[in-house]
Each structure stands twice: as structure tokens, then as C-alpha cells.
Image (cartoon, helix red, strand yellow):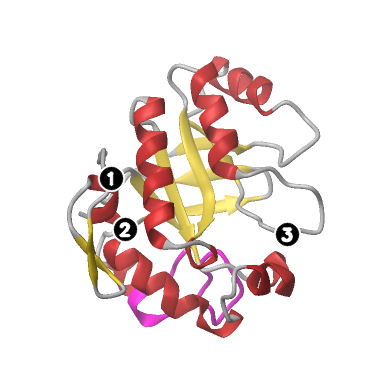
């Protein structure tokens, strides 16, 4: 079993936390993904990029990236860029989001709350190819991002009938199938920690 910690969202030095975790021999550090949360919260990709520049070994996890809050091409670009900056240390947790993100966040990105599951499935279908710099169909157009990067190991909070980065009912059949077929590793996120199984393989 691999153990990691969740970095503070704001108000405390994320780099100091990550360096301490690396010194203790922990496997990973994780950062949440919130656009308009109740409390102040920094952007996950930028925090993890900063931590990447200040650490050498510890893995960097999105815990979890809420895919329907952003265009999938931008999500893939962020993941690929962080892979290059970190020396391929990224762990990708994905989710469909839920009430914790608030209605204001969904309105701000013009995404109907009820469509988040379907949009998550659609994003997961093309995300690995986009990250790798391979052609993927996005809104009917072939898109190729450059430079591509290795698709990171991914984790999902999905278990049959449970949650995927959101409340019960936000997980679609396609998302559950992705995790059961080995497209995602299974992990459990408690308050302030990650435990992740080491079996399985990511999409692609």
C-alpha cells in the first residue's frame, strides 16, 4: 500500500509540507481541485508545479481533478506539462464533482450540474491520447497537443455503486466500467491522506 498526504489548499506552505513528506519517505502528495469553494483554495496544477520544482522523488497527485469543470484539451495540456516539469511524477485522480464545488462554480464555467457525469465519461475517452500527443476527436475535430507526455498512473474514487469525486449518483456506467476494466487504479481518499492500491494499469 502506498500512502500520501493532502497538501493545504491555502494559508500554509505547500512546498514545506511536500518536502517534509518526501523526507519521511511517503509516496505522494495530493491537492484538491476547487474553482469556487467555501474557503480560499489555490489552483491544483500550479501548486503541484511549484512543488515539483522543490522536490525530487515524491509523486504529485490531483486529488481529484474535476474533469467537467474544464475543457478536456486544457486538462490534458496541464497534465502533460506537469509530467514534463516533474520528471513524470504525476498521479491523476479524476472525478465528476459534486455539491462541494457549489452551484456558482458550475455556472461560472457554463456546465449544467446534471451533465457532469456524461462530460466526465466523454473526457476520459480522449484524455489519454491527448496527454500522449496523439490525435483525438474533440467536438468532432481531430486535436493533437504538443509536446505529448507519458500518460500518468491514474486513480479514481470509483467503486461499483459508490462515489467518483462527488455524491452518489454522479457516476455513469461508462466511468464505473473504466475502473473495473483497469483503466483506473482504485484509491481511497480520507481526510488529509491518500491510500492507493498498487495493482492495475491506467488507461492507454
Q: Circle 1 sits on which residue? A: 151
Spatial CA span between label 1 and label 3 = 28 Å
Residue depicted at 69% across the width and 72% down the height: 99
Q: Secondary structure at mark 2?
A: helix
- Left or right: residue 66 compared with residue 40: left
The percent position of residue 60, horizontal first and vertical second, equals 48, 34
Earlier-in-chain disc, 3 versus 2: 3
Q: Is residue 170 magenta?
A: yes
Tell me if mark 2 has few (under 14), some (14-19) or many (20+) residues whose alpha carbon lies within 10 angstroms of its own. many
Q: Secondary structure at mark 3?
A: loop
Q: Circle 2 sits on which residue? A: 127
- Location of residue 38 by image quarter: bottom right
Spatial CA span between label 3 and label 2 = 24 Å
Earlier-in-chain disc, 1 versus 3: 3
Nearer to me, 108 or 182: 108
Q: Circle 3 sits on which residue? A: 36
The percent position of residue 153, horizontal first and vertical second, equals 33, 44
Residue depicted at 26% across the width and 42% down the height: 146
Q: Which mark is residue 183?
A: none
* Part of the protein shown in magenta: 158-174
**Magenta stretch, overall SS:** loop
Residue depicted at 45% across the width and 63% down the height: 71
Earlier-in-chain disc, 1 versus 2: 2
User: Would you say residue 193 is visible in this rendering?
Assistant: yes
Amino acid at each position: 500500500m502506498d500512502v500520501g498526504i493532502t497538501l493545504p489548499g491555502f494559508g500554509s506552505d505547500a512546498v514545506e509540507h511536500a518536502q517534509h513528506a518526501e523526507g519521511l519517505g511517503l509516496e505522494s502528495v495530493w491537492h484538491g481541485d476547487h474553482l469556487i469553494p467555501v474557503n480560499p483554495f489555490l489552483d491544483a496544477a500550479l501548486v503541484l508545479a511549484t512543488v515539483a520544482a522543490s522536490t525530487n522523488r515524491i509523486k504529485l497527485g490531483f486529488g481529484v481533478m474535476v474533469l467537467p469543470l474544464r475543457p478536456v484539451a486544457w486538462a490534458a495540456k496541464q497534465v502533460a506539462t506537469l509530467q514534463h516539469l516533474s520528471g513524470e511524477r504525476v498521479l491523476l485522480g479524476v472525478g465528476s464533482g459534486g455539491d462541494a464545488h457549489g452551484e456558482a462554480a458550475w455556472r461560472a464555467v457554463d456546465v449544467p450540474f446534471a451533465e457532469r457525469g456524461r462530460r466526465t465519461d466523454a473526457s476520459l475517452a480522449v484524455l489519454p491520447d491527448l496527454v500522449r500527443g496523439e490525435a483525438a476527436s474533440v467536438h468532432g475535430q481531430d486535436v493533437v497537443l504538443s509536446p505529448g507526455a507519458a500518460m500518468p498512473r491514474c486513480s479514481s474514487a470509483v467503486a461499483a455503486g459508490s462515489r467518483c469525486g462527488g455524491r452518489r449518483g454522479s457516476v455513469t456506467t461508462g466511468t464505473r466500467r473504466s475502473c473495473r476494466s483497469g483503466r483506473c487504479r482504485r484509491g481511497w481518499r480520507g481526510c488529509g491522506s491518500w491510500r492507493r492500491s498498487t495493482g492495475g494499469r491506467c488507461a492507454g
